[in-house]
Every structure is written in structure tokens, then in C-alpha cells.
Image: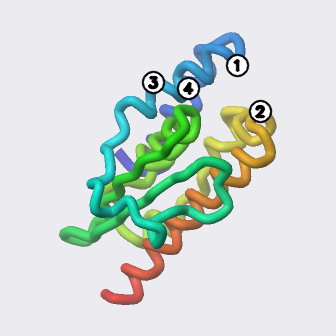
Amino acid sequence: MNIQEIETEIIEEFSLFEDWMGKYEHIIEMGKSLPVIAERYKTDERLIKGCQSKVWLHSEMKEGKIFFSADSDAIITKGLIAMVMRVLNEHSPDEILDAKMDFVEKTGLKEHLSPTRANGLVNMIKQMKLDALAYKAKV
């Protein structure tokens, strides 16, 4: 599945819920499926800056695709990073850099997250795109 198809799938999932309680529960469930970062990568260098909660992100490139792993100390934040990873994981640096990430606005996340969580979400996406840019520069 390409990035746009994954974003569309997330938007459709969110449209199934009538209220934000259901949507938050869905985000929390996504967090439970997060490919957890190895403990050795839970370092200060891998903390995403500007997040209200602690979020560690690790990436590595294999066969032209970037693989992310992450963890957070907060359940909603864990769900948010899981959602972003669902969209960007196992794609090429160019695909990640070109991703519009429309699902953030189209699901209503942008206006329903607290300002600090929304800022954290933006920083998660930004860090993943910076990682993609760094891998692209090495190729």
C-alpha cells in the first residue's frame, strides 16, 4: 500500500466513530500495536523535542526503505506515533519526504488535540521526515 492509500484508510476508520471518545480509544488501540523501540535506543538523542510526553524514535534503512520503531510514556502519544508510523514506515526516503500527511487534518486530529499534543504530533512527523532526508543524503 502506498502512503496516500494508508492515509485514506485511517481517515475512513476515523469516520466510523460518532464521537471523540471512540476516536481516542482507537488511537490508544493503535498504540498497543506499536513496534516497540529496543531499550538501547531509548536515549536522550532519540527523544523527539517539543513533545509534552517522552517519545523515542529510532530509524534504520534497509534495502532502500526506512524502518521506524518508537515508544512513549503516554498512551495517547503512543497511539499518535503508531499512527504516523503506520503511514510512513517501510517507505523510501523520497516517499516519506513527499507525504502530505493530510490525515492529520482530515481526521480532525489537528483541532481535537491539546496544543501541546498537536505540537508533539507535528514534531514527530518532522523528525521522521528529517531522518528520511538524512538517509536520502547518504544514498
Number of marks: 4
Q: CA distance from mark 1 to mark 4?
A: 15 Å
Quarter of the figure with residue 5:
top left
**Local SS, label 4:** helix
Which residue lies most toward the bottom here? 138
Q: CA distance from mark 1 to mark 2?
A: 8 Å
Of callouts 1 and 4, which one flags the residue occurring earlier in the amino acid sequence?
4
**Which of the image's four quarters has the N terminus?**
top left
Of callouts 1 and 2, which one flags the residue occurring earlier in the amino acid sequence?
1
Residue 91 shown left or right of residue 124 in the figure: left
Residue 56 shown left or right of residue 62 in the figure: right
Looking at the rendered structure, the kind of residue marked 1 is Trp
| Residue where numbered disc 4 is placed | 12
**Local SS, label 2:** helix
Give x and y (percent) for residue 132.
44, 72
Q: CA distance from mark 3 to mark 4?
A: 16 Å
The mark found on residue 20 in the picture is 1
Determine whether label 1 and label 2 are within 8 Å by CB: yes
Of callouts 3 and 2, which one flags the residue occurring earlier in the amino acid sequence?
3
Nearer to me, 71 or 1: 71
Nearer to me, 98 or 65: 65
Looking at the rendered structure, the kind of residue marked 2 is His
Which residue sits at x=70%, y=45%? 117
**Local SS, label 3:** helix
| Res 38 visible | yes
Residue 99 shown left or right of residue 135 in the figure: right
Looking at the rendered structure, the kind of residue marked 3 is Glu
Of callouts 4 and 2, which one flags the residue occurring earlier in the amino acid sequence?
4
| Residue where numbered disc 2 is placed | 112
| Residue where numbered disc 3 is placed | 29
